[in-house]
Amino acid sequence: QVQLVESGGGLVQAGGSLRLSCTASGSVFSTFPMAWYRQAPGKGRESVARILSGTGAITNYADSVKGRFTISRDNAENTVYLQMNSLKPEDTAVYYCNTISSAWKWGQGTQVTVSS
C-alpha cells in the first residue's frame, strides 16, 4: 500500500507564497498521474491541480487557482510539489495529494491558512 505524506503548509498573509510537498512510498509513483486536492471547513474535497504525465509535461488547474499555483513532480524523489503564489483567504484548507483517481489511501494532509 502506497503511503502519502504531505508537508509545507502553514500560516501566511494574503499575497504570500507556500510550497507544498507530497512524498509517496513505493516504486510505482512515476507511472501515475497525480493531483493536489484541498478541503476547506464545511466543504467537500476538490481537485485544484493535476499533473497528467510521468514527465510532468501536461498539467491543468482549477479556475480558482489558475495562474497562481504550479504543480510539478520529481519522480526520482517520489515527490509532487505545489507552488502556491498570491495566496488568498479562500485558499485556506487542508491540502492533500493523491492520484487523479484517488487510488491510494489519503494522507494526513497539510493545513494552509491564509490571513487577510
Image (cartoon, grey):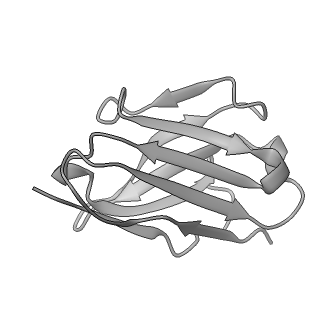
- Hey, which quadrant is residue 51 in on the image? top right
**Relative image position of residue 6 (x, y in whole percent):** 56, 66
With 5 as the anchor, is 109 left or right in this view? left
Residue that sits furthest to the left in the current view: 116
Residue that sits furthest to the right in the current view: 27
Q: In this view, does 71 lie above or below 67?
A: below
Q: Which residue is drawn at 27% across and 49% down?
A: 16
- Hey, which quadrant is residue 50 in on the image? top right
With 95 as the anchor, is 106 left or right in this view? right
Image quarter in which the N terminus is found = bottom right
Q: Residue at x 49, y 36 (%)?
A: 70
Image quarter in which the C terminus is found = bottom left
- Residue 65 in view (yes/no): yes
- Hey, which quadrant is residue 22 in on the image? bottom right
Q: In this view, does 69 lie above or below 13?
A: above
Q: Which residue is drawn at 70% across and 54% down?
A: 79
With 67 as the anchor, is 5 left or right in this view? right
Q: Residue at x 52, y 76 (%)?
A: 108
Numbered label tally: 0
**Relative image position of residue 43 (x, y in whole percent):** 26, 60
**Relative image position of residue 23 (x, y in whole percent):** 69, 62
Q: Which of 9 and 91 is in front in this view?
A: 9
- Residue 100 in view (yes/no): no
Q: Nearer the viewer, residue 28 or 114?
A: 114
**Relative image position of residue 93 (x, y in whole percent):** 31, 62
Q: Nearer the viewer, residue 97 or 72?
A: 72
With 9 as the anchor, is 92 left or right in this view? left
